[in-house]
Amino acid sequence: MSLNLAKHHTDPTSRQGAMEMMASDDPAVRQRAIRFLTDTKTIKPKQPPPEPSMSMEEFNELQERQRLREGARAQIVRARESMERQAVRNRLERVRFIREAQKRSKSLGFANHGTYI
């Protein structure tokens, strides 16, 4: 392989030029060649090492937090259903109260003015 020294002072323009630059002893030249090859997706950049898998305690903590979250969700659903049932009871109570008031007013001889359901 012939090394063209003029290429060493600039970035490579081809894969062949980059490969020639990789053979250089100068680390800066090799770095430019690596940058060219990674930018053109000829080679893949080094990936950081994968994270170590979690320990058993971390896994148990994660599961416990998930169980607590699910329990909290279930509690919220139960509370919402309870509030809805209470709202229905309140509406029924209000209707009963108004109807009783209408019956009382009729029995006393008053008209139904102003009592609406």
Image: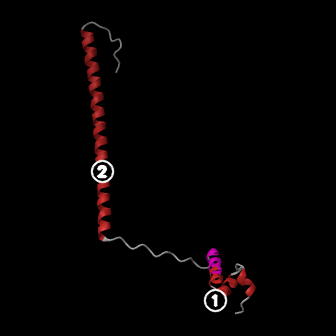
Which badge, 1 or 2, is on the more N-terminal residue? 1
Residue at the extreme bottom of the image, as rendered: 1
Q: Is residue 1 above or below residue 107?
A: below
The residue beneath circle 1 is 25
Specify the quadrant of the image occupied by residue 29: bottom right
- Along the line of sight, the residue nearer the viewer: 90 or 14: 14
Q: Residue at x 30, y 32 (%)?
A: 88
> Local crowd at mark 2 within 10 Å, few (<14), some, or many (≥20)?
few
Q: Residue at x 30, y 28 (%)?
A: 91
Q: Nearer the viewer, mark 1 or mark 2?
A: 1
Q: Is residue 4 above or below residue 62?
A: below
Q: Is residue 19 left or right of residue 91?
A: right
Give the dominant element type of the magenta stretch: helix, strand or loop: helix
Q: CA separation, marks 1 and 2? A: 63 Å
Give the residue type at disc 1.
Answer: Asp
Residue at the extreme top of the image, as rendered: 109
The residue beneath circle 2 is 72
Residue at the extreme right of the image, as rendered: 6
Q: What colouring does the structure picture have?
A: secondary structure
- Tell me if residue 38 is in the magenta stretch: yes
- Image location (x, y in percent) of residue 47: 51, 75
- Which segment did they paint magenta? 32-40
Give the residue type at disc 2.
Answer: Ala
- Tell me if residue 10 is in the magenta stretch: no
Q: Is residue 62 left or right of residue 29?
A: left
- Image location (x, y in percent) of residue 111: 32, 9
- Image location (x, y in percent) of residue 80: 31, 41
Q: Is residue 104 above or below residue 92?
A: above
